[in-house]
Amino acid sequence: MWEQSPDIEWIAPYKGFAYRPQTTMVPRAEQERALSVCGIDPADFGNVADPSFFIGIAIHAGVESGITADGNVNMVQHLVQHRPLKVDTDIQIAGRVTDVEDVPRGQAVTSQVDFTGPDGDVALTAKRRSLRPDPAKSGARGAGDRPPPVVEDSAALRDIGDVEMTPERVTGYRSTGNPIHYDPAAAKAGGFRAPIIGGGMGVHYLAAAIWREFKPQSVDLDIYFRRPIFWDDQLKLRVDDRGGTWQAICLAKDGKVATEARINHIG
């Protein structure tokens, strides 16, 4: 979907830093390839770009503006699709760093990226809070305030699918970019027993379940990355629909929530 410029000069992110204007798209062929690798039927989305892709595109927009993603870990992602964006369509990017906070393990960086479609209106907004680890604090714990859980007990939710991670699936999804997602040595250096999937890869499973059920025009999700998902984990896809509407959805492993989303709106 992209290639990193070879002559990027890295900077330390700071509050107010603006990304350079960029143009992107989600090619149909790449969406079909990536979703198929995940075991998801691309027909679930049809001509609409899976909004999960914009998590990675937003990260890459920061990289192309000089903020390295190496070793960084997603913690919270707010994803709002105001209206659908189509595959194979030029999309304009405007992003900025909205906050940088010192935490015991390094820095927590908050950013917002807006994606504008051909009509000139913002179609999707991706807000992200990520941990930028400091190697000198590798033994420290804590990455700032921890939001309360969306799902208190994953076993109380309805099972709607199984998800199997394998090294081949994870590296097949994306074997470039942040090496903690495909390089065992880099993952170990980052404090993980094995490579972990990128946040966006896990969100594909949540989004696909929502699209299969609702085919929405708009959606508003607060996504939390509670536990790392390793490239050999076995997961359950579960939904909280006890009130008659979908309120939350999660990936759970060993009975505990790994990635969860509060569903604020489906329209």
Image (tube, grey):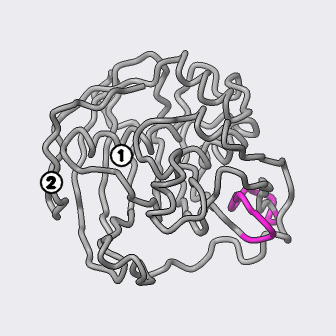
Residue 186 image offset from top left, x and y in percent: 45, 55
Front-most of residues 219 and 157: 157
Which tag, 1 or 2, sits closer to the chain's start? 2
| Figure quadrant of residue 254 | bottom right
Q: Secondary structure at mark 1?
A: helix
* Residue for point 77% across, 46% down: 164
* Residue for point 33% across, 21% down: 118
For badge 1, the amino acid type reads Ile
Residue 234 image offset from top left, x and y in percent: 78, 54
The C terminus: image quadrant:
top right
| Figure quadrant of residue 50 | top right
- The mark lying in front, picked from 1 and 2, is 2
Instruction: Read off the residue under disc 1.
Output: 59
Residue span colored magenta: 242-256
For badge 2, the amino acid type reads Ile
Q: Secondary structure at mark 2?
A: loop
The N terminus: image quadrant:
top left
Residue 185 image offset from top left, x and y in percent: 49, 54
* Residue for point 61% across, 58% down: 263
| Figure quadrant of residue 124 | top left
Front-most of residues 31 and 245: 31
